[in-house]
Image (cartoon, helix red, strand yellow):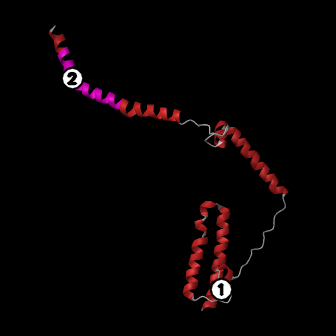
């Protein structure tokens, strides 16, 4: 009987010391793991795609939904088919000749009225303004076509500046 009392006292003392730690862990688990997960699931249920006032129009783009529905293999097969079609179209069309570049006079590029001559300081100021407006890095994010166009415009500005600089000196 004495041994039994000893075990009861020892276990209750240990339980008394471990109980706050256990409660702390249990409360922490529910507070920081279960509760946020519960809210996340509830929010996701509330954010399902909703139908607009116009019948048949869904809030997310329909193309995105279609892409999600199609399997990877189907998309890969379509991409290969499109690539084949593009190759066939390119081989059927005769090669296009590049259009000759339109050359503008230096005065037109710098928007100087005919007969007016700018001094070096005004010319340099106008040159930097035009470069700031037409620099290829400014339109690089818009795509390669815009970048190529900006490069051509910048080359024309540079050559016009050299021409006008000779006249201004």
Quarter holding the C terminus?
Answer: bottom right
Instruction: Please report contact status of discs 2 and 1: CB closer than 8 Å, yes or no.
Output: no
Q: Where 124 sits versus 142, above or below?
A: below
Label 2, secondary structure: give it: helix
Tell which residue pokes out farthest to the front in this image.
53
Quarter holding the N terminus?
Answer: top left
User: Which label is found at residue 116?
Assistant: none
The percent position of residue 134, horizontal first and vertical second, equals: 61, 71
Label 1, secondary structure: give it: helix
Quarter of the figure with residue 14: top left
Residue at 67% over, 67% down: 148
The percent position of residue 117, horizontal first and vertical second, equals: 63, 89
The percent position of residue 145, horizontal first and vertical second, equals: 68, 63
Q: Where 99 sits versus 79, above or below?
A: below
Query: Does the magenta segment cover residue 21?
Result: yes
The percent position of residue 80, horizontal first and vertical second, equals: 74, 45
User: Nearer the viewer's eye, disc 2 or disc 1?
Assistant: 1
Q: Where 103 sits versus 2, above or below?
A: below
Q: Which residue is mark 1?
A: 163
Over which residues does the magenta segment extend?
8-29
Quarter of the figure with residue 35: top left
Crowd rating for badge 2 (residues with CA inside 10 Å; few <14, some 14–19, many 20+): few
Residue at 76% over, 45% down: 81
Q: Which residue is mark 2?
A: 16
Q: Nearer the viewer, residue 3 or 48?
A: 48
Crowd rating for badge 1 (residues with CA inside 10 Å; few <14, some 14–19, many 20+): some
Q: Is residue 118 left or right of residue 78?
A: left
């Amino acid at each position: 009987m004495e041994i039994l009392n000893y075990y009861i006292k020892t276990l209750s003392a240990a339980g008394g010391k471990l109980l706050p730690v256990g409660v702390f862990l249990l409360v922490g688990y529910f507070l920081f793991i279960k509760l946020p997960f519960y809210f996340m699931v509830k929010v996701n249920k509330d954010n399902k795609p909703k139908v607009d006032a116009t019948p048949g129009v869904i809030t997310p783009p329909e193309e995105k939904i279609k892409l999600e529905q199609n399997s990877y293999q189907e998309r890969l097969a379509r991409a290969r088919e499109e690539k084949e079609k593009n190759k066939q179209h390119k081989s059927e069309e005769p090669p296009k000749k590049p259009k000759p570049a339109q050359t503008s006079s230096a005065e037109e590029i710098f928007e100087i009225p005919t007969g007016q001559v700018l001094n070096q300081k005004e010319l340099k100021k106008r040159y930097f303004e035009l470069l700031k407006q037409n620099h290829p890095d400014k339109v690089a994010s818009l795509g390669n076509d815009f970048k190529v166009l900006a490069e051509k415009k910048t080359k024309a500005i540079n050559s016009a500046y050299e021409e006008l600089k000779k006249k201004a000196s």
